[in-house]
Image (cartoon, coloured by chain):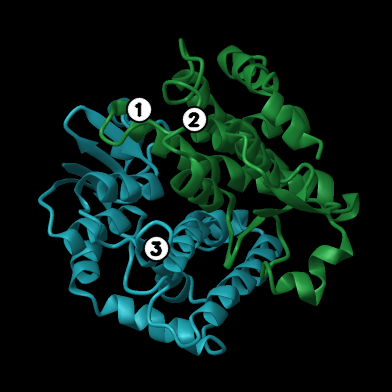
Chain colours: A green, B cyan
Amino acid sequence: MKLYYAQNTRAVRIAWLLEELGLDYEIERFELGSPAMRAPAYLQIHPMGRVPVLEDGDIRLFESGAIVQYILALYGNGQLQPAVGTQEFAEYLQWLHYCEGMIMPPVNTLVVETVLLPPERRTELNVKRATKLLNQILMAVEHHMQGRAFLAGDFTAADIMTGHSVTVSRDMLKMDFSDKPNLSAYADRLLERPALQKARTL
Amino acid sequence: MKLYYAQNTRAVRIAWLLEELGLDYEIERFELGSPAMRAPAYLQIHPMGRVPVLEDGDIRLFESGAIVQYILALYGNGQLQPAVGTQEFAEYLQWLHYCEGMIMPPVNTLVVETVLLPPERRTELNVKRATKLLNQILMAVEHHMQGRAFLAGDFTAADIMTGHSVTVSRDMLKMDFSDKPNLSAYADRLLERPALQKARTL
């Protein structure tokens, strides 16, 4: 398998999963924002010039959640996802999708408005609205994490998706976690995993 | 099963799936924006007061993509998703996740900025940016749909997720589809399905 990767992107999720599963893969490495990601050759691979993209023989796909489910279905041997029909299976699916469905839209806004745009093109109102919304969205995870080590029973791929977006919210966007002790301990717990440490720095 | 539902929301996707599969379900119906969706009792069911939520005996979950995958895994008997290991399986997962990963963030912005906010609180720059981004994102689907009837072989749940967001983009947000003939024909094809017609008007 070949992973199109850049540090500090959703591609970290896929490298993390591959490392957790101990699977072999090669990487095609980009610097985030590099013109190579906008080159015609790469736009044939991802129409918006984003990472991650996974190639597996003749198969090529994008969307981190899709790639996670693809890898688990073909190479997971039942690891990192609860058995169908359990309570944890429903929790797993919910938190797997919560990442892009809830957390990432305001994260995207905050990355654009506080990192990517030059200061003169930023809109303070957008920062304020996205910060308030993201705080509510994270607080729902904080409440769920009361008394839990992971989102859905043992460590699963839901922790790779939503857990990654939690670490980004705290450590890249500097969201206030002082009122989110469960979530901060959870982020620390994830960052201790060797597979994530390796995936962040490929 | 019980579906918490409102017209013109992501809950339409779940009703659509249930109708396609011919499954029995009851609905708890809300009017979009109703105070009942912000009442403490409902915030116990969904922490942000959103729909859809699905209850199935003791199991309760939210996130439309998660509910779709839950229903298919438990009650789908292999319908509406390609077999694992096929080319269509990878396409299916990609387009299932493309809906919330790519299409819905600018759709959300446009709904907020052109429908929900009072005119004096709207930001024209946000409308312009989100319209441009959504157009690029839809154009990638337009190109994929060249010569295809559905996103991943036969009709699948990916058409329910990404297809629904395409119909919303065209018919609710009035995005320009004049340069997207494949996508417009695709939206028409979906809207002809009796299951979607029923799901939109419960």
Residue under label 1: A88
Instruction: Kindly indicate whether the residue at mark 1 contacts the one at mark 2 (C-beta within 8 angstroms).
Output: yes
Q: Is residue B12 above or below residue B41?
A: below
Badge 2 amino acid = Thr
Badge 3 amino acid = Ala
Q: Mark 3, chain letter?
A: B
Q: Can residue B74 be seen in this view?
A: yes
Q: Is residue B165 above or below residue B148?
A: above
Q: Crowdedness of circle 3 by 10 Å Cα count: few (<14), some, many (20+)?
A: many
Residue under label 3: B158
Between B12 and B83, the one lying in front of the other is B83
A161 with respect to A152 (left or right)? right
Q: Crowdedness of circle 1 by 10 Å Cα count: few (<14), some, many (20+)?
A: some
Q: Mark 1, chain letter?
A: A
Between A30 and B121, the one lying in front of the other is A30
Q: In this view, does A80 lie above or below B17?
A: above
Between A7 and B61, the one lying in front of the other is A7
Residue at left offset 57%, top offset 59%: B102
User: In the structure shown, which secondary structural element does the residue marked by tag 1 occupy?
Assistant: helix
- Residue B96 placed where, x, y %? 44, 59
**Quadrant of residue B46 in the image?**
top left
Residue at left offset 69%, top offset 30%: A196
| Quadrant of the snapshot with the C terminus of chain A | top right
Badge 1 amino acid = Glu
Residue under label 2: A156
